[in-house]
Each structure stands twice: as structure tokens, then as C-alpha cells.
Amino acid sequence: MTSIQKTFSPIDGSLYIERNYADTVQIHAALKSAKKAQTAWCNTSLDERKAICSRAVDAVVANKEQIANELCWQMGRPIRYAAGEVNSFADRSRYMISVANEVLAPVQVSEKAGFIRYISREPVGVVVVIAPWNYPLHTPINTIVPALLAGNAVILKHSAQAPLCAERIFEAFQAAGLPEGVFQYLHMTHEATEAVIQSPEINFVAFTGSLSVGSRIEKLVAGRFVGVGLELGGKDPSYIRADADLDFAVENTVDGAFFNSGQSCCGIERIYAHESIFDAYVEKLVGAVKQYQLGRPDDPETTLGPLVNASAAAFVRSQIKEAEAQGAAAHINPKDFSMDQEGTPYMAPQVLTQVDHSMRVMTEESFGPVVGIMKVSSDEEAIALMNDSEFGLTASIFTQNIDTAIALGDQIETGTFFVNRCDYLDPELAWTGVKNTGRGCTLSKLGFNAFTQFKSYHIKIIS
């Protein structure tokens, strides 16, 4: 087995970065260091933890230009958008820092004569974060910051496609004065990562990625009684009601489906439009999609970059071809996008109609620049189709009737329900999912709960 981790850029297929995989000695040392450091860190005042986290965020923001360029080359984000992830990294982190005192304060119970009673929130210990490449900054920070604020130590294992993100986050915390061992990163093979998950030093596993790997992680921790947070993907739907503002709906759903080349867990992958506005909606949406500029992401004019690699693009193309063979109608001619070329990560966006749920493109996560649109005749039909999925991360409805939308939202099986927006993460709201999207919750005040354990104090006063 190779001892070198290689990252090839989707821009041109070149070898962008090489790193040595951590060996057994290094991994063992990191685990021991984290365990030891956590004991001292949890006894550090919350004010000091907050100050260090704030300085680390400032250090990342100060390095925005370099990090944005590295994001572009590692995973293909168009350079015109890459800095935006640094901004959202900061926004999420600062929100969590701002609520830490309230969230981590002891839980007070009713007064009882002769007793002092309260519930404290203790850190769980050492948290391992396994992060994805598609949003390589703000996905791990959803876990790292609340875990550190709660007094835990953290070990970050980042995707092999975005190793520099782990290094930049680490450097920021080092510059902020974080004690040695409290936050570390390891570049590891899959086998080494599984061994770390099973290590007795690990008390919580946070993973974002595929359903198959999430299922594997659950098996790895079985019987150890440690916490697990799993965000495993989605096939997020949107419903365009008859009374929707079509221009507004098109603007939002096009962005929701094609931003980041469709490589978003909460991106729109299937759309249901009421029959009365179906043709008008499709015409407007196709027109908007044709405005994308497919090209090298390091070109400031590019609005649609490559997928992460050629195999990812081949998978999406296979869904499209299979759907067309089953009767789907494609509305985009790939030849209109000069950079589209089979065998490369560059592929044109695609809009499909005459689709149904017998087609993989409407049921299987695509994670690419394609969306299928189905015609529906009623709210009831739309809701039934939206719920016809193994996943449940987000769902959205576009309508001018808010009361009806909320009533319909009550029927949708999803972690986040949007009205007149989509593909957005609000740090004040819980980020969670249902069904095979996984388990657990990050962000909001509730996102701290995973990284704390309750301890009750029951003190009798003897006069």
C-alpha cells in the first residue's frame, strides 16, 4: 500500500499536492496527545476557549485569498465563489462562539429547600471529525468549534481531495494560541481511519459523506457506546406551486440545483411543478441554465466549474443517458458548452422532463449538474412524491400562500423545510436529517448537545 496521499486537481488533472500518510506511531502519538490535552483544556475557562476560537477564525479570514485559490485547485470551486466559503466558515463559527455561554451554562432546576441541584454539561472527551471535500471549510467547522468550546479535543481527518483545508484550519488555531494536542489533523488511509474510530481514546465520531461509509462507521463503533453524528446525503426536492412567483422560483431553484456544480448535500436534485405553470417554469429555468459559463474554475468568468473528478462526471452522465433511454427529454445540448467532454470532469448542466421515479436520476443521489422536473396536478401528489425517497435532508416549496406552505411542510419528511428559498444553511437553525440522511444535529444552540454529556449535582445542605 502506498504511503503517499495524492491530490489531483479537477482543473487539469495535474498532481496538485502530495502528503505522507500518518503512520501507526504518529497516529498513536496523536491519540495520546489529544487525550492528555483534553484534560487540561476542559479546565480552561470558557472565556479563554472563546477567545482562542475567535482568533483562529480571524486568522482564517486574514488568509482568505490563499485559501480560496487552494479551494479552487483542490475541488474545482469557481474562483469567483471560493472566498464565499471562508465567509460562511466565519459566520457559523462566530455564531457558535456568541451563544456558547448560554448553551454551556448549567441547567437550573426548581428550588428545593435544603438542597442545591443543577445539571452541568461536561465534554465527551476526544472527537474525531471526518470531513468531505465538497464544502471542505464550513462542514468540519460545524463540529470543530462547538466541540472545542465545550472542552473537547478534536482530531480532523479531511478528505484526500482537500488536505490543505485541514492544514489551514490547524495553522489558524496554532496562531490563535491553542494548546498543543487540543486540535490536530491526520492524513490517513481508510484502514487507519477505521482503526482510529475504534480506538479507546475516541469518544465521538462526526462524519459527513456517503450512506455506505456512514453505515460502516455505525458498525465500527457498535458496542462502544460512543456518540456518532452522521450526515449521509440527500435527494432534495422542491415543489413549485401554481401560485409561485415564477421568476423568483427559477432564480432560486437554478442556483439551488447547479451551484458548486450540483455537488451539495442539500442541493435541489428533483423538482415538482404544478401542471398549470409547468411549461412556463421549465422554459424560464432552461433559459437560466443556458446562461452558465462552463470552464476552468481559475477563470473569473466561469460560473460552472468541473466536477471533482472524471468518474463523478461519468456517474452523472450515466444517470442522464439511462433516463433518456427510458423516455426522459433533455433540454440542454451539451455541445452548446464547449468545455463539455466525456472522460473529463467538465460536463454541461442538464435539465430533464418526462421523468418519473422509475428512473435513477429521480431517486438516486446525483451530486452533479442535473435536475429532473415532474408535472404534478395537486399538492397531495407533490407531497407524496417529495416523500418518496430514502433521504430527507431539506425540502422546499415556492408559493405565495405561507399558511398553506407551512401546513404542507408539516407533512414532508425532512430535516429542514424551506419556503421560497432552498440550498441554504442558517447557523441559528438545527442542521439535521431524517431517514437515510443520517442521525444527529449540528449548528444552532442544539448543535452543542452532541459534544456534551449531562452530569447531575444533587447536594444536601446540613446546617
Image (cartoon, rainbow, N blue to C red):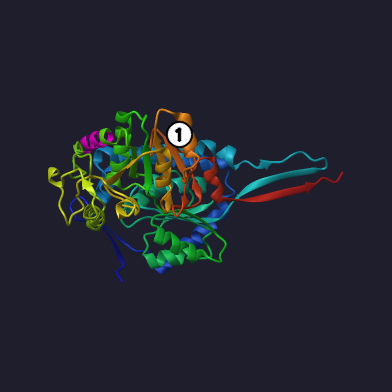
> Along the horizontal axis of the image, is 93 left or right of 72?
right
Residue extending farthest front: 377
Task: Report the residue at 65% width, 42% height from top.
Answer: 106
Q: According to the image, label 1 marks what residue?
A: 405
Please tell me which residue lies in front, 199 or 320: 320
Which of these two is toward me, 292 or 279?
279
Q: Viewed as shown, does residue 420 lie left or right of 334?
A: right
Is residue 287 rendered magenta in the image?
yes
Q: In the depicted view, which residue is nearer to us: 39 or 326?
A: 326
Q: Residue at x 42, y 38 (%)?
A: 379
Is 226 on the left-hand or right-hand side of 309?
right
Task: Identify whether 167 is placed above or below 224.
Answer: above
The secondary structure making up most of the magenta span is helix
Q: In which quarter of the image is the N terminus?
A: bottom left
Q: Farthest residue to the right: give it.
A: 463
Task: Please provide the residue range marked out in magenta.
Answer: 281-289
From where the camera sits, is residue 83 visible? Answer: yes
Where, quadrant-wise, is the C terminus in this rendering?
A: top right
Near-viewer residue (441 or 32): 441
